[in-house]
Image (spheres, rainbow, N blue to C red):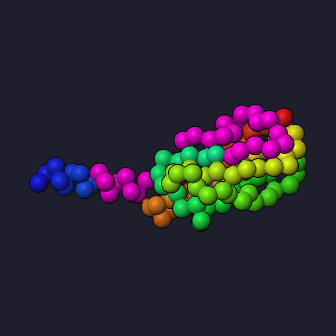
C-alpha cells in the first residue's frame, strides 16, 4: 500500500513541473549559418504546440515563427528563413501539460 501511495505521489508531482528547455538548435549564445536554418526546442515535459508561440528578433524586426507539426510531444520545430547576419533572439512561450505557461529567451548569432 505504501509503495502505491508513493508511486501516485511521484507521478502527480511530475505532472506539476513547468516546462524547462533542455536542448535547442540554436544553442544559447551559439552561432548558426544563415540565412535559413531548422529551429528545434526540446523540453523536459510534453508541450501543447497549438497553444505555444515562437518569436524571432533579428535586424531590428520581430516576427512570429510558424511552427511545423511537433516531431515529438516534448519538442517544437520550425524552418526559419530570410535571416540577416548578426544578433538574434528567439522568444518562446509554451503551454505545458500541467497547464502553466513558461516563457524564455534564447540569444544567438547568425552568420
Q: Which quadrant of the structure image shows residue 51?
A: bottom right
Which quadrant does the C terminus fall into?
A: top right
Q: Is residue 23 magenta?
A: yes
Q: Does the magenta stretch include residue 60?
A: no
Q: x, y (%) of residue 44?
A: 48, 47
Using the image, determine if residue 86 lies above or below residue 79.
above
Q: x, y (%) of residue 108?
A: 74, 39
Left or right of 84 in this view: 29: left
Using the image, determine if residue 85 lies above or below residue 4.
above
Q: Which residue is drawn at 81% across and 49% down?
A: 81
Left or right of 97 in this view: 65: right
Q: Residue at x 46, y 61 (%)?
A: 97
Q: Can residue 72 be seen in this view?
A: yes
Left or right of 93 in this view: 10: left
Which quadrant does the N terminus fall into?
A: bottom left
Using the image, determine if residue 108 lies above or below residue 43.
above
Q: Which residue is drawn at 19% across and 55% down?
A: 5
Q: Can residue 18 be seen in this view?
A: no
State the extent of the magenta-drawn residues as a range. 10-39
Left or right of 74 in this view: 56: right
Q: x, y (%) of residue 47?
A: 52, 57
Q: x, y (%) of residue 19?
A: 51, 52
Amino acid at each position: 500500500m505504501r509503495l502505491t501511495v508513493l508511486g501516485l505521489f511521484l507521478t502527480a508531482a511530475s505532472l506539476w513541473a513547468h516546462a524547462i528547455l533542455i536542448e535547442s538548435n540554436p544553442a544559447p549564445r551559439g552561432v548558426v549559418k544563415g540565412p535559413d536554418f531548422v529551429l528545434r526546442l526540446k523540453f523536459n515535459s510534453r508541450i501543447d504546440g497549438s497553444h505555444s508561440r515562437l518569436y524571432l528578433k533579428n535586424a531590428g524586426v520581430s516576427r512570429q515563427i510558424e511552427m511545423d507539426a511537433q516531431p515529438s510531444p516534448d519538442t517544437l520545430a520550425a524552418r526559419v528563413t530570410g535571416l540577416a547576419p548578426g544578433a538574434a533572439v528567439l522568444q518562446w512561450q509554451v503551454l505545458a501539460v500541467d497547464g502553466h505557461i513558461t516563457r524564455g529567451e534564447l540569444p544567438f548569432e547568425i552568420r
